[in-house]
Image: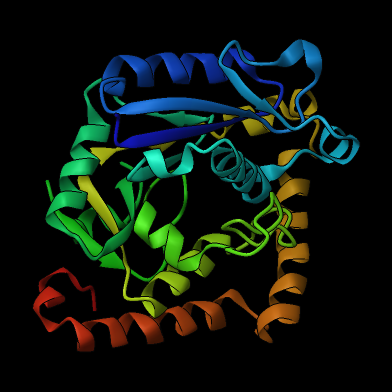
Amino acid sequence: MKPVAAIVLNRNLPEVTDALCERLERSSGDVADIFVVESGSDRDRLSRRCTWWADWPESLEMGLRYPRGFNFALSRLLAEGRYGDYEHFLLLVNDAEIPAEPWVAALLEVMREHPRVGILSPCSRTWGERELIGPEGVRYFWHMSQIAWLLRRRYVDDVRELEEPTYMNFLYDGENFRGYESEIELVIKGYINDWASAITTRAFVDEDKNHLVTKHQLIRTEPFEESVMKCVQEGRRWMRRKYGFHSRWCMQMYAKLFYESFFVNYPYLAPFRIS
């Protein structure tokens, strides 16, 4: 049994998604099974690797975006009795650029060395965090961007919806449609439950945002600048309604509070802390 379920989101970019899946198969097929979620794709724009198709009217009109999309995949794995087959879940956006080397194996090695890490992200070559971490390093953070995340199943089980899991609530809050600060919400839930979030420079990933800029009509979303504006506007309303926070800075400081408490409980992990 392979230790990782790799979940890739597609919406009307089958060539991009298939190329990513093929590269992932070549580099990490020995440790990862690959699942593709069609997040409201048109029938004639499905990936060759399609596993599940979100084809109900709202999804076809609006797409699932990544909070509902990853929720959908995880809930399908659970419903089909395959969720418990995997120790980790790799969540990938389809515009991720991954290396040819076996980088998932490198992430698994970090997970083995850091049993209190629930969320692990490969670093991007463009992130400032790269300088904080250093070469071949690992550091724990209270805020991380999401391009490719490896989640430990035990972490997911501690924070996910247990009673009625659906595409709206399995892991992410589906009410936060465009995913504004949804990464930090999962980081917070991790630290509250004694799970750290880490970034490593033993593996790298980048994101080709050119697809969002040049192919937004195919993806059936707004132009890039308009999409970003809506993400912030809608996300702030969600954050204010749910947490009472007026800015992302408030939410980050909330995360940092639990981050600092984590090292009080696990002082031996202080070498991986950032100040």
The C terminus - image quarter: bottom left
Residue 202 visible (yes or no): no
Residue 56 is situated, as x and y percent measured from the top left of the image, at 85, 34
Q: Exactly how many numbered labels are in the figure? A: 0
Q: Is residue 102 left or right of residue 118?
A: left
Q: Give above or below for 31 relative to 77.
A: above
Residue 127 is situated, as x and y percent measured from the top left of the image, at 35, 50
Q: Residue at x 38, y 76 (%)?
A: 193
Among the 4 quarters of the image, the one containing residue 42: top right
The chosen color scheme is rainbow
Q: Residue at x 47, y 42 (%)?
A: 83
Q: Is residue 218 left or right of residue 155?
A: right
Q: Give above or below for 159 relative to 45.
A: below
The N terminus - image quarter: top left
Q: Residue at x 82, y 38 (%)?
A: 59
* Residue furthest out toward the front: 81
Residue 242 is situated, as x and y percent measured from the top left of the image, at 70, 79
Q: Is residue 143 left or right of residue 227?
A: left
Residue 49 is situated, as x and y percent measured from the top left of the image, at 56, 15
Work out whether residue 81 or residue 211 is closer to the camera in this orientation and state it: 81
Among the 4 quarters of the image, the one containing residue 260: bottom left
Residue 143 visible (yes or no): yes
Work out whether residue 241 or residue 166 is closer to the camera in this orientation and state it: 166
